[in-house]
Image (cartoon, rainbow, N blue to C red):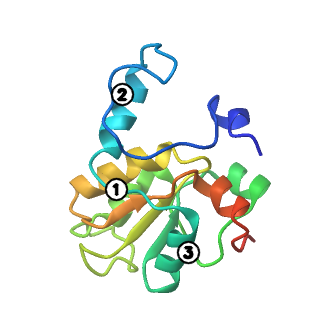
Amino acid sequence: MDGRALTGRPASTTAGTPTTGTTGTGTALSGVDRLLERARATYGRVHAGEAGRLGASGGLLVDIRPPAQRAEYGGIPGALVIERNVLEWRLDPTSPHRHPAISRADQPVVIICQAGYASSLAAASLRELGLTSATDLVGGFEAWAQAGLPVI
């Protein structure tokens, strides 16, 4: 699937270098693009194979996509579904509302959205709350499915 259909931008992306204020074509970055670059510069992102290995070895895969996207494109077996609007409350290691799957602040957590944009901002937010190993999946669910990893 072409990520432009949902996000207006290409599905593939490169991770984590601080912004220079322009895109590769020399046009100025939007405010949200600058925010995204700053967030990604604070942690290392993972690719689909590594996310699969983390999930298989006790890390949490957390799907933050809305129900309509999960219904249309599928889901990841074993992934915890926590929608974006309650993510911080459910994954904050100190919250009385945290999900029982969060057992410690350094637990590996991989946030997954459809194309790998919203998950970057979510992962940065979780790191600010104290989840020191929170990260996100480069390319999101689209990259997971394209890598041939299990989809339900």
Which residue position is annotated with label 3? 52
Q: Residue at x 42, y 54 (%)?
A: 86
N-terminal label among 3 and 1:
3
Above or below, 82 relative to 113:
below
Secondary structure of residue under mark 2: helix
The type of residue carrying mark 2 is: Arg
Q: Nearer the viewer, mark 3 or mark 1?
A: 3
Between the residue at mark 3 and the residue at mark 1, the CA separation in whole angstroms equals 23 Å
Residue 8 rendering spot, x and y as whole percentages? 64, 28
The type of residue carrying mark 1 is: Glu
What is the tally of numbered marks visible in this picture? 3
Residue 55 rendering spot, x and y as whole percentages? 50, 78
Which residue position is annotated with label 2? 34
Q: Quadrant of residue 131?
A: bottom left
Mark 3 vs 1: CB contact within 8 A: no
Residue 57 rendering spot, x and y as whole percentages? 46, 86
N-terminal label among 1 and 2:
2
Residue 1 rendering spot, x and y as whole percentages? 77, 46
Q: Nearer the viewer, mark 1 or mark 2?
A: 2
In the picture, measured across the screen, residue 133 lies left or right of residue 45, that is left
Above or below, 114 relative to 97:
above
Dot 2 crowding, Cα within 10 Å, few <14, some 14–19, many 20+: some
Which residue position is annotated with label 1? 88
Q: Residue at x 33, y 67 (%)?
A: 97
Dot 3 crowding, Cα within 10 Å, few <14, some 14–19, many 20+: many
